[in-house]
């Protein structure tokens, strides 16, 4: 996600696109500036704590808004209705609202799509449950999504690349103090689908660079963290601009719908029966 919920494009599709465009991988790599040295803070100067990206609180709600229009203002993109011209184009996620309850071992992911549709997915005790298109029943999200595994390690797996050497100082983000991190796109640690795609391309062109393959709109990856909580505020990886908004969680516990729990119980029972060995001779 790298699992990336903004597009839900399969790895196989991307590989086919790359294979159909051999010139992309064969271009000579461009020269890029050396990475900026890590900032050495003075005594008393604000500096980020470790871990750099903490877990969200045990009960938390936050929304991640996505755009590929890096020049658009946040207010303009947040309330924009799907354009008529977008009909027939690839559906992408405009935002995902995360709700977390560690005690219930549950997450709810509410995705708002570019065509105006929305859908909920639930991760309950490690099982990722989604609804089939057209409300045709529930299913377990399998190997095509690593979301459940990623959220088990971090609430913000897309920021796994961040290191202290990327710290550039205390800045102002929309009037509030923020820690800024940056790194050239070609030097950012890749994960997930991007890492697999690069490995595939480099089998035929060892000199291929991430910039040549993914064609980011910016060469410098930039992240802002709230200087108090160190939760993310904005992340621009050159391909998608993500803006994070946190709010006070509901007073009520996060409770998966009854149909989700019924589905999981039925699945658990089916697995139990399947894994139970048959009775041997002389056994009931």
Image (cartoon, rainbow, N blue to C red):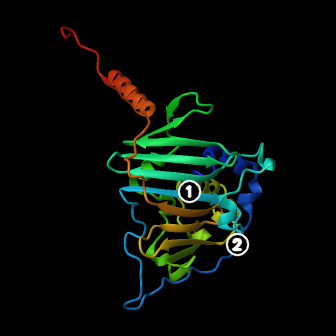
Vertical position of residue 273 compared to residue 131: above or below: above
Determine whether, in the image, residue 268 is placed left or right of residue 138: left
Image point 37% across, 91% down: which residue? 43
Q: Secondary structure at mark 2?
A: loop
Quadrant in which the C terminus is drawn:
top left
Q: Quadrant of residue 265?
A: top left
Cα gap from disc 1 to disc 2, whole angstroms: 19 Å
> Residue at point 66% right, 65% down?
75
* Left or right: where 48 falls relative to 241: left
Q: Which residue is mark 2?
A: 30
The percent coordinates of residue 88 (x first, y second) are 78, 42
Nearest the viewer among 181 and 21 is 181
In the rendered image, the residue lying farthest to the front is 251
Crowd tier of the residue under label 1, counting other residues whose Cα lies within 10 Å: few below 14, some 14–19, many 20 or above: few
14 relative position to 139: left or right: right
User: Which residue shows up at 70% across the image and 45% down it?
Assistant: 115
Q: Nearer the viewer, residue 120 or 281?
A: 120
On the question of residue 9 being in view, the answer is yes
Other-residue count near label 2 (Cα within 10 Å), few / some / many at <14 / 14–19 / ≥20: few
What residue lies at 70% left-to-right and 51% top-to-bottom?
Answer: 18
Identify residue for label 1: 195
Q: Residue furthest top?
A: 282
Quick one: SS at disc 1? helix
The answer to whether one can see residue 4 in this image is no
Q: In the image as oriented, which residue stretches furthest toward the left? A: 282
In percent of width and height, residue 114 lies at: 68, 49
Expressed as whole percent of the image width and height from the top left, the position of residue 157 reads 48, 58
Q: Earlier in the sequence, mark 1 or mark 2?
A: 2
């Amino acid at each position: 996600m790298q699992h990336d919920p903004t597009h839900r494009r399969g790895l196989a599709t991307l590989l086919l696109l790359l294979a159909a465009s051999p010139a992309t991988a064969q271009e000579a790599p461009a020269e890029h500036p050396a990475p900026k040295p890590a900032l050495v803070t003075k005594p008393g100067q604000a500096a980020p704590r470790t871990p750099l990206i903490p877990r969200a609180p045990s009960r938390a709600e936050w929304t991640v808004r996505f755009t590929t229009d890096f020049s658009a203002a946040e207010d303009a993109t947040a309330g924009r209705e799907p354009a008529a011209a977008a009909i027939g184009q690839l559906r992408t996620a405009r935002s995902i609202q995360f709700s977390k309850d560690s005690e219930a071992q549950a997450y709810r992911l509410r995705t708002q799509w570019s065509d105006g549709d929305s859908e909920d997915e639930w991760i309950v005790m490690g099982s990722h449950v989604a609804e089939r298109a057209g409300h045709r029943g529930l299913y377990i999200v399998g190997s095509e999504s690593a979301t459940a595994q990623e959220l088990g390690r971090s609430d913000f797996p897309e920021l796994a690349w961040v290191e202290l050497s990327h710290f550039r100082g205390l800045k102002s983000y929309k009037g509030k103090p923020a820690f800024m991190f940056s790194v050239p796109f070609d030097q950012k640690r890749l994960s997930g689908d991007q890492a697999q795609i690069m490995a595939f391309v480099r089998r035929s062109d060892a000199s291929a660079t991430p910039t040549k393959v993914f064609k980011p709109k910016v060469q410098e990856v930039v992240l802002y963290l709230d200087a108090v909580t160190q939760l993310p505020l904005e992340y621009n990886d050159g391909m998608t601009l993500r803006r994070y908004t946190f709010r006070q969680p509901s007073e009520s516990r996060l409770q998966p719908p009854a149909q989700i729990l019924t589905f999981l119980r039925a699945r658990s029972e089916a697995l139990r029966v399947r894994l139970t060995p048959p009775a041997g001779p002389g056994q009931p």
